[in-house]
Image (tube, rainbow, N blue to C red):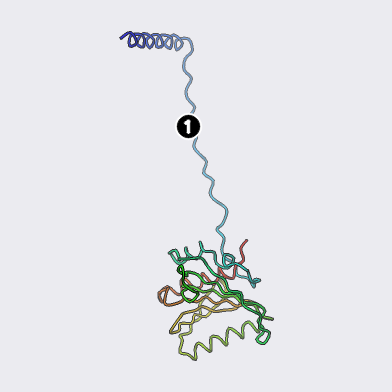
Amino acid sequence: MRGNKFFVALSAGALAVSGACSSVAPQTQAPPPQIPKITPQTTPSRVPVMVDRALPDDCELVVPVEVMNATLGQELPGEPRIIIGIKEPGIGRTGKIDCYYGIPPKQDLGAAKIVIGLSTYTDELTARTRVTESIEAERGDGAKITEVDVGKQKGTLVEGKDEQLLIGSLGKSTFVVRNRNGFIPQAKLVAILPVLAQQAMTPPV
């Protein structure tokens, strides 16, 4: 009980002192609250710009996994695998890579959901010729052929029996994005494959 009484007396004293002080110096008015200044974001989001690019040596430099998953709207299993092809002077090819995405653990390349291939050739005419020859071969096998926009470029959507692919060229380079085993539904091909092709032809900054 003594402790309680001491606390009350101390509080009363504190109030008295406070009252005395207030009678000597009137309280100053609090400044108005500061309104935060909102600065709009001026940095634009990066838009893929396709170029006649040199062949990378890593699939993260073709289509990063994060971009692949965001474009597909789901997370693919496994890690991308890259196969570096050989030069073929007979057809004017100077380099080739293929990136395999979505390979489940303990399975081989054939289980990939998406395959992106980039090739380089000796000149633009050779690159365009190789694309044309590939399209005509698919047409001969009964595939449906449709021209689509790939960024500011054009590409060709090939819908075959076993896979669907988007193929095109830019300068001395060619690109192909393959949809394996019906992974992407037919209704979404035009919305997804061109985005992946555009990204594949865009070097990282």
Number of numbered discs = 1
For the C terminus, give its image quadrant: bottom right
User: Height in image: 62 above or below 166?
Assistant: above
From the viewer's perspective, is residue 44 above or below residue 71?
above
Residue that badge 1 annotates: 33
Q: Is residue 107 left or right of residue 119?
A: left
Q: Residue at x 58, y 74 (%)?
A: 83
Vertical relation: 62 (above or below) 145? above
The residue at 38%/12% (across/down) is 11
User: In the image, residue 96 lies at what x, y percent?
Assistant: 62, 77
Q: Amino acid at mark 1?
A: Pro
- Residue nearest the observer in this picture, 17 or 68: 68
View extreme (left): residue: 1
Residue 201 picture quarter: bottom right
Q: Residues within 10 Å of mark 1 (few under 14, many from 20)?
A: few
Rendered view: 164 above or below 48: below
Picture coordinates of residue 203 (x, y %)? 62, 66
Which residue occupies 46% across, 86% down? 143
* On-image quarter of the N terminus: top left
Of the pair 71 and 179, the residue shown nearer to us? 179
Residue 154 on image: x %, y %: 55, 77
Residue 67, position as x, y percentages in the image:
51, 63
